[in-house]
Structures are given as C-alpha cells and as structure tokens.
Amino acid sequence: MRLLIVEDDRDAADYIARAFREVGHVADQAPDGEEGLALALDRQYDVMIVDRMLPKRDGLSVIGELRARGVETPVLILSALGQVDDRVKGLRAGGDDYLPKPYSFSELLARVEVLARRRGGRGEETVYRVADLELDRLSHQVKRGKDELVLQPREFRLLEYLMKHAGQVVTRTMLLENVWDYHFDPQTNVIDVHISRLRSKIDKGFSQPLLHTIRGAGYMIRDR
Amino acid sequence: MRPAEAPARWRSALKRAVPGWVRPRLAALGKLFHTTAFKLTLVYLTVFAVFAACLLGYFAWNTRRLITEQITRTVDAEITGLSEQYNQGGIQRLVFIIDARARRPGSSLYLVTTFSGDGLAGNVGLLGEGVLEHVGWTETVYRRLDDPDGTEHHALVRVFQLQNGFRLLVGRDLEERERLYDIILAAGQWSIAVVIVLGLAGGFLVARRVLHRVDAMTETSRTIMAGDLSGRLPVGGSEDELDRLAVNLNLMLERIEALMRGFKEVSDNIAHDLKTPLTRLRNRAEGALRSGRNESDYRAALESTIEESDDLIRTFNALLMIARAESGQSSAPMTEFDAAEIVRGVAELYDPLADEKGLTLRADDGAAVPMCGNRELVTQALANLVDNAIKYGSRGTPSADGEPPEVAVRVESEGGYVRLSVADRGPGIAAEDRAHAVQRFVRLEQSRSEPGSGLGLSLASAVAHLHGGELKLEDNAPGLKASLMLPRGGPQLPQPAE
C-alpha cells in the first residue's frame, strides 16, 4: 500500500512513516499543504493522511482541491480539534475518516487499511463468508457450518462489520462509530462485552475460533 | 511666574503656613468638601438663599411702597381740607386751624408762609433748602419746633400754592417707614445667614455620613483587592441607593468568590488527577529501565505505560469538553431528535455490561419524546450516567424477591423539560455530598478505588448546562437517581435581568 502523509510536525510524521514502513507499506511525506497537494496530484496513492491544520494551505482546502480535480483517493484527517462538529466539517469537506489527536498507531493503521481496501472491497457482496461462517445481508441469516445462529439485530450488524473487514484489524472505536454511530469514548469498555457475547454465539462449541482479539489494537475475524 | 505655576506655589505657601497637626484634618475636610453630597447641598443652598433674598426684597419694597402711598393719601386729604378752609375763611381761619392741629401730639407737619417765605403758622422749624420754592412732593430733612432736642428727621412733604401768594406745606414723618424697612431688611439678612449656616452644617453632616459609608466600602474593597475574597461591603439596612449598590456588589463578589473557589479546586484536582497517573507512568518506565531483565518485562512495562497514557488522554479530553460546555463556547449544533431513541440506544449499548455485573438494565420502551439539543452530547451524558449507575449499582443488594438489583433508564416529559433519568440501587450519595459530586474530578471517598476518570457526573452536568438545563441528583431509596433535565426546545437565550 502506498501512503501520503501530509503533516507539519516532523517528529510525528517521521514516526508514522517509519511505523507504516515497518508493517510493509510505502509512505511519502509532505510538510505543508502546497507540497502535499502537488504530490497527491503527481502520484498515485492508496490512502492519504492529512493533518487538519497545515502551513501554507489548510488541510481541508487541500482535500477540497483534490476532490474538485476528481482525485478520489481516500483521505483520513488527523486533527487536534476534537469537538463534535469538527469531525462533521472534516467529513463534509471530502474526508473519508477523522481521527482526533492524540491517537494510537494501531488505531491509525486499522483505519488506513480499511480505507485502502474499501475500493473494490466486499462492500457490494450480499453474502459474506469466513471459513464455515456465513452471513447473508439480505435475509439476515447467519450460519456456522450447518447450524443457524440466532443473533440480536445489533449483534448481526457487529458481525456484518467485522466480516466486511475480515482479515483486517477493527478497533473498538471503529466499531463504536460504525456499528453504533457513537462518536464518544465510553468510560468502560462496553464493546468488549458485546464482542464476548458475539463470540459465545459464533465460536462456542466449534474447534476453530474465528473472532480474535488483537492485543492493544482491537478485533479481527479471520480464517486461520 | 507663569499662571500654571500659581496653584503649586500657593499650595506650598499654604503648607508652610499651616502647622503639621492641622494638615491631616484639613485634608479630611477637603475630602468632605469634594463629596457629591456636599456639592449638591451647596447648590441647593445657593438656590434657596437667592430665592429667599428675592422674596424678602420684594416684601420690603412693597411694604415701603404701601406706606408711602398711605402717607401721600393722608397728606393729599389734609391739603384738600385745609385749602377748602382757606377758601372759605381766609388766612386767619387757616392759621387758626393749623395752630390747633400742630399742637396735637404725633401730628403731621404743617407750615403756612407768605409769598416771601415768612412763616405764619405751623410746627416746622427747619427745612431742607429750596423745599418751599418747589411746589409738589419732596423728601426733606426737617426739625420740629416743639422738639426739645432739635434733632433732624426725614419727612415726605407737599407744598401747595394757595391763592394770594400764600403757601401751605403739609408732610408726614418718614421714620416709621424707614424703621419698618430696616426691620424687614435685618430680618431678611438674619434669616439668610441662618439658612446658610444650617445648610452648610446639614451638607457637612450628610456629606460626612455618605463619606463615612463610602470610606468603609473603599476600605473593604481594598482588603478584597489585597486577596481576601471573603470580604463583603457593609450594608446599612436603610435600603437606600448605597445599600442597593453594596448588595449588588456583594452578589458580584459572591459569584467571583465561587468562581475562584471552583478554579482553585479544579486546579488542585487537575494537579491530583493528572499528576497521580503521570507519576505512576514515570515510575513504571523508570522501574522497567532499572530492573527489566528480558524483553517480556520491557514489553509489559511499555504496554501498561500506553494504557496509562490512554487513561490520561481520556481524562484530558473529558476535561476539555467540560470546560467548553461550561463556558458555553461549544459550537455543538442543535437539532431535533427523539429522546426515547437515545435512551433505547444507550441502554442497548450497556445492557451486556450490566448483565455481566449482575444487574438488570431496564429501559423505557415508550413513545417518542421529541426534543431539541445536541444529540451526541446528550447521548454521551446519558451514557456517562448509565456507566456510573452500573459501576456503583453493582454493589447494591438484590431486591426482596431475589431479583438482581436494577438500573432503570427512563425518559419523561415534565412541563417544558425532558427528564432523562438513570436510577440505581447502589449505595447512593448522601444528601450533603450531592452538590459536591457534580463538581469536576470529585470521586467521593468510598469510590476512590473504582476505575474511571471521575468526570462522568461533571460531564453530564456540563452538558445539561449547555442545553440550559441541569443535572439533578436525588435519593432513589436506596440508591441514586440522576436526571438530566433538558429544556424541550433546546437552550434559550438568557433573558435580560430586570
């Protein structure tokens, strides 16, 4: 995966870029809005990470310009502004995801990978399959092998999101945002309890567990 | 010497002239004269004195005019009578009558002369020069013939030309008129003097009283400025304008004191709640450096460091949000939404957690309750309350029939408000601690061991304030009932005070 990081904080940008390279991605860096825009127009990227406040050209204006020129590269906005409507503004300006600072690298990585695979991903499929687990998005049926599983509506959506991103790490915040549409941090980790409930329904009694906890990052459904 | 130098020179001259012990008293007196009360008194006094002087002057002048008129009329009548007697009985009869009249005590002045000016009869000895030659009214000095002292007096006289060259002079003494006039003038001067003295004294007293109170206020405000915020301005109890001012300033001081106390408490608490985890963080890192033997030791230390800093970030974010909400600076957009849906959503999110803690989470499944507000913030506030209720409610005792302790989330309409309430069966909060519990960072002693930033209730309270509502903490007997009271129509603009 090829990334562009537009961030004026040199240390932060270096750290992210190095971390992405360590997990096998290619990362370019731009220290300001003008250079970021020039690079984004010149080369092909899978995902762009753009800081909201940049010298020379504001992050939102860079995204607006890119979208106006027909560049549809997914953009994740980083911002020190964490107020309710800052996220809305960022997404309205053409961003695809919004991550307030300070963030953890695992969160950033998980989100960037989801963004990168969104295009041509499994968004359009009607049936998601992971090993012998099967989820039918139209009939709302879930089967593990031959057994039909009875899920609550929310459990269904939770599993649907996890299976849509099968093989990818999904963080707790991503689940809270995408499954519940909540954009705040609950004091207790309520998501863990939901996951363990779901796990007891889809993995209990089967020799091969599918729903894995990735320490320090989140969860993943995978066939191994 | 340039003119501008003059006052300074006079002041220094005055300084030299006045002994040292008098100077502070003079300064105090000077302050008194500069008060508004004294200046006002002075203005009133001047206006009143001028008015009184005009009135008295008019009175005196009018009295004088009346007396003069009366004299003129008397003299005219006598002359008419006497000239008639002369026309009828000739000069002998006139002389006879005048001799008789002139001898009466307190009589008018009479004189009959020949054409050459020789006196024939009368009681006038000496007259002013040329009086006799001038026919008509004259004011003149005179001396009475029958006056043993021979002193000169003033009189108003009329000279009348009789037939055959004789002249008749009749007049009245003016002493009475002058005396009356003098008395009135003197009375006027005295009364004006008394008015001025009393007025000055009154102004002085009023000014001193006002100055005394203002000085007391100034003194208090100085001590307050010096840092003692508990000071209050003295209130006289007479409910006058100074009292009203003092009462209002005291209210302002109270608000400032409360804010400062809050500020101090917050900074103390920030120091505590941020320094404690920071210290832990640092200790852990230091400990790992010192005694870490292998990679897994370091890994464990780093992982707990990250966890700890996540907690710090969470606390910090909550703090920022509370600060924004409390200062009313949040640009959170307000929209219409269904409060019942929020309750269902939050209850659904927390239901498994409650279940795991051995609690029953019961949520209203009622009709829609539309309201205006920031959906996300209200959800967050309610989630915080539910989180708290689960945290503390799990220590509650099961109900009599063996049911697990329950956490009830409800939405109700109350007048113009929407009440979003969360009731638990936990230990509750003592009535005297409830107000305290809403403040930032306060975790009551019994809950110090629980995880959590201690900001849940404060955050809910700040969100309620942002919406123009409040967070109510009530007794659930047993347990705590926390309610977000939010105005249905969203935050209202503050009304101007009356």
Image (cartoon, coloured by chain):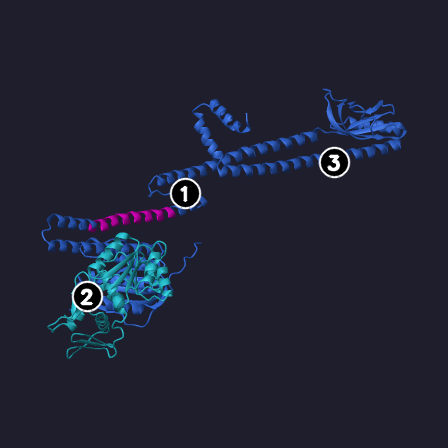
Chain colours: A cyan, B blue
- The residue under label 2 is which amino acid type? Tyr
Label 1 Cα neighbours within 10 Å, binned few <14 / some 14-19 / many ≥20: few
Same chain shared by disc 3 and disc 1: yes
Q: Quadrant of the C terminus of chain A?
A: bottom left
Q: CA distance from mark 3 to mark 2?
A: 124 Å
Mark 1 falls within which chain?
B
Rendered position, B52 above or below B316: above
Residue ID for mark 3: B69
> Is B486 within the magenta?
no
**Closer to us: B142 or B314:** B314
Rendered position, A124 above or below A18: below
Would residue A24 appear left or right of A66 to someone viewing this image? left
Residue ID for mark 2: A219
Would residue B2 appear left or right of B222 to someone viewing this image? right
Would residue B78 appear left or right of A222 to someone viewing this image? right
**Closer to us: A33 or B176:** A33
Q: Position of residue A143 (x, y in %)?
A: 18, 77
Instruction: Mark yes or no: residue B464 visible.
Output: no
Residue ID for mark 1: B236
The reply to whether callout 3 and callout 2 are in contact (CB within 8 Å) is no
- The residue under label 1 is which amino acid type? Gly
Mark 2 falls within which chain?
A
The outermost residue toward the left is B293
Mark 3 falls within which chain?
B
Residues in magenta?
B251-277
Quarter holding residue B165:
top right
The outermost residue toward the right is B164
